Image (cartoon, helix red, strand yellow):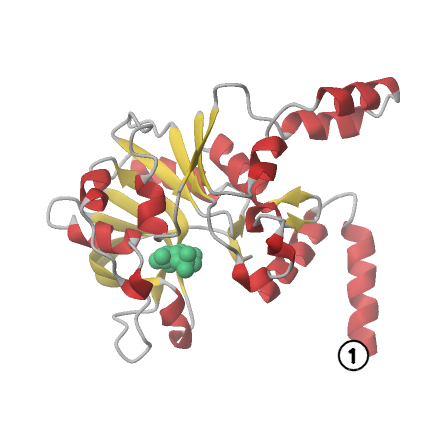
Amino acid sequence: MKKIKTAVFPVAGLGTRFLPITKVIAKEMLVVVDKPLIQYAVEEAKEAGIEKFIFVSSRGKNAIEDHFDSAPILEEALRERKKFRDLQKVIDSQLDSGQAVFIRQHSPKGLGHAVHCAHNLVQEEAFAVILADDLVLAPKGCLKQMVDAYEQSDGNMIAVENIPPSETFRYGIFDIASQDGKKIKAKSIVEKPAPEVAPSTTAAIGRYILKTTIFDNLKNAQAGLANEIQLTDAIQNMMHETPLTGYHYDGTRYDCGMKIGWLEANIAFSLKDPEAQEETRLMLKRMVKELA
Ligand code: G1P
C-alpha cells in the first residue's frame, strides 16, 4: 500500500484580494464559522492519514504557527471554569510537537517554487499538497478520497471539477485522454488558459498527490505564467514519465480566495454546524424575504 504521510501547505501568499484584513491577518487564518481555513485543511489531511505537516510560510504569518501550538494558559483557564467543550476545541486545534514544520519561502515566486521549498523535508515517494483557500465540504474528506483512489493509481493526481467555460483562466485545465468513473487520464495540463484556447472545462483544484520526483523538475523550472514558477508546468513537464490522473471528488468546493466564495462557505458550513444551523436558516429566510 502506498502510504501518503506528508502534506505540504503553501501559505506564503500575500492574500491581496482580501486587503486590508490581510495586512496583518494571514489569508489562511480567515475564519469560516469558527475555524481558520488552514485548520480545515489540516483536519482534512489528518482524516487522510497525514502524519507530517509542512507549512511553507512567509514573513508576518506567525499566527499560523501559534494556532497549531498548545495554549497552556487558555487551557488551564477553561479547565478551571469547567468549559470542557471549549477546552476540547482548543486541544483539537493543536498539532503535536514534531508533527508540524514551518519553513519560509523568501520571495513570492509562485506555487511551484513554494512546493519546492519543502524538498529537503519530504522523505516518501509521494506526498500531498493542500491549498487551504480551496475549502471542500464533503462527507468524506477530499484528500482521503484521493488517497484511497491513489492505491490503484500511480504518478501524479489532482482533484478536479467541471467549471463554467468562462472561468478557465483561473485554473489549471486538463486536456483529457480518457475517463474511467471518477478518474481522468490526462493528455496534458495547462495553467490558466483563456476560454478560447482551453482544452476542456475540467479544472484542477487545490488538492494534489505528487511524486517526489517533481522536486527535480521544480529545481530547474523556468518562470511561467505571471512570471511565477508554476506547479502545473512542472506536472506537465514530467508527464512523459509520470502520468497525471484527475480525480472527480465528491463534495462542494468553496473558493475562499475570493470574497463571494468565502461568504458562501461561511453560510454552507454554518448550515452544517449543529450550534449554528437553526439560527442560520432563520437568518437566511429573513434575508430572502427582505430581498423579495
Ligand atoms: C492554483 C494553481 C491552479 C489551480 C488552482 C486551484 O492557482 O496554480 O492550477 O487550478 O490553484 O485553486 P491559484 O488559485 O493559486 O492562482
Q: Is residue 184 left or right of residue 18?
A: left
Neighbour class for label 1 at 10 Å: few (<14), some, many (≥20)?
few
Q: Quarter of the image containing the C terminus?
A: bottom right
Task: Report which residue position mark 1 lands on.
Answer: 291
Ligand 1 quadrant? Answer: bottom left
Question: At 30% from the left edge and 46% from the top edge, which residue is drawn?
Answer: 157
Residue 190 sits above or below residue 150 on the image: below
Q: Position of residue 241 (x, y in %)?
A: 11, 44
Residue 213 occupies quadrant:
top left
Residue 193 sits above or below residue 26 on the image: below
Residue 198 sits above or below residue 119 on the image: below
In front here: 253 or 128?
128
Question: At 28% from the left edge and 72% from the top edge, which residue is drawn?
Answer: 198
Q: Position of residue 148 (x, y in %)?
A: 37, 36
Q: Position of residue 164 (x, y in %)?
A: 42, 73
In front here: 124 or 117?
117
Q: Is residue 263 left or right of residue 81?
A: left
Q: Position of residue 58 (x, y in %)?
A: 47, 43
- SS class, disc 1: helix
Tell me which amino acid carries mark 1: Leu
